[in-house]
Amino acid sequence: MTGEQIRLKRLFSSGNVVVVAVDHGLYNGPLAGLIDLPHVVQSIVDADAILMSPGMPAHCADVFAQRNAPSLIVRLNWGTQYATQWQYGTAHSVPMISASDALALGADIALAGFSLHTGDERMDADNIAVLAKHIVEKRAAGIPLVGEFYPAGAEDLAPEQLQEQVAIGCRIAAELGSDMIKTFYTGKDFDKIVAATPVPIFGLGARKTPREIDALRLAAGEIRAGARGVVFGRNVVQAREPKRFLDALKEVVKAGKDPEQVAQKFGIE
């Protein structure tokens, strides 16, 4: 059994996976709910994994040094598509660190994002080259990698456009050798994307939902469609009570419970 397989089995040891993303400061700066990151991470230690930027695990080392700590996922690259406050017209990815660098930081898993259909063929090819290089490096390092497919302008695409782009992007990520994929939930036909993608898919949370129960419903839809977990950020850390919301989210994702009943149990509206 390789290092990749050991780390993957550990991640999925309790079934479907709940990942909390707290790497937003890397491209959006200090957002509400993420100002004091060490304090935030202490409140989400019951997640299966936490996604962080390369420079932040050192500030939260006490959490990851504990027995039964959540898996640490470290992002390897940066892309203009995530800096939404500046409304860039393209989605250009560049590497920050290697998979072996992530291991040295204490990571159990690496993540690399990419975008396609940017409107620039060379940029699309360059984005694929960045992801492919990270995949070569993760094999050598023995660390699994999440390929995050983030279509250019994803949150403003029409449903049929999002479905088509996510279907193609997920398959490309798998064909390149990603061990898992993080991407947008596309709605009623998301199950077709899952069926055509031979590695586990995690549905992301994207923008903060108007109501916390909406985020639970989103997670339930992703799991019903075949996702093996979720990666939620703002919907957890900007909740009124992040720990309580995380506990509710785990019941939806890991136990498959009805989001309406879970919301009632935890007093979530």
Image (cartoon, rainbow, N blue to C red):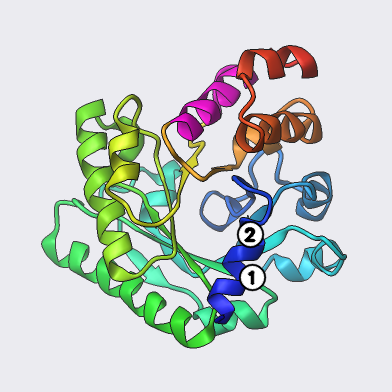
Residue position for label 2 = 11
Instruction: Report which quarter residue 68 is drawn in.
Output: bottom right
Observer able to see residue 40: yes
> From mark 1 to mark 2, how far is it between C-alphas?
9 Å
Majority secondary structure of magenta residues: helix
Say which amino acid is labelled 2. Leu
At which x and y percent is residue 148? 41, 55
- Residue 84, relative to residue 197: is it above or below? above
SS state under label 1:
loop
Please identify the residue farthest to the bottom as the structure is shown: 140
Labels 1 & 2 near each other (Cβ < 8 A): yes
Observer able to see residue 158: no
Magenta-tinted stretch: 208-224
Quadrant containing the N terminus in the rendered view: bottom right
- Residue that appears at 33% across and 34% down: 190
Instruction: Report which quarter residue 136 is drawn in.
Output: bottom left
Could you tell whether 10 is left or right of 155 in the image? Answer: right
Q: Between residues 201 and 1, which one lies in front from this camera angle?
A: 1
Say which amino acid is labelled 1. Asp
Q: Is residue 183 located in the magenta-colored stretch of the structure?
A: no
- Residue that appears at 48% across and 37% down: 206
Identify the disc placed on residue 108: 1
Q: Between residues 268 and 259, which one lies in front from this camera angle?
A: 259
SS state under label 2:
helix
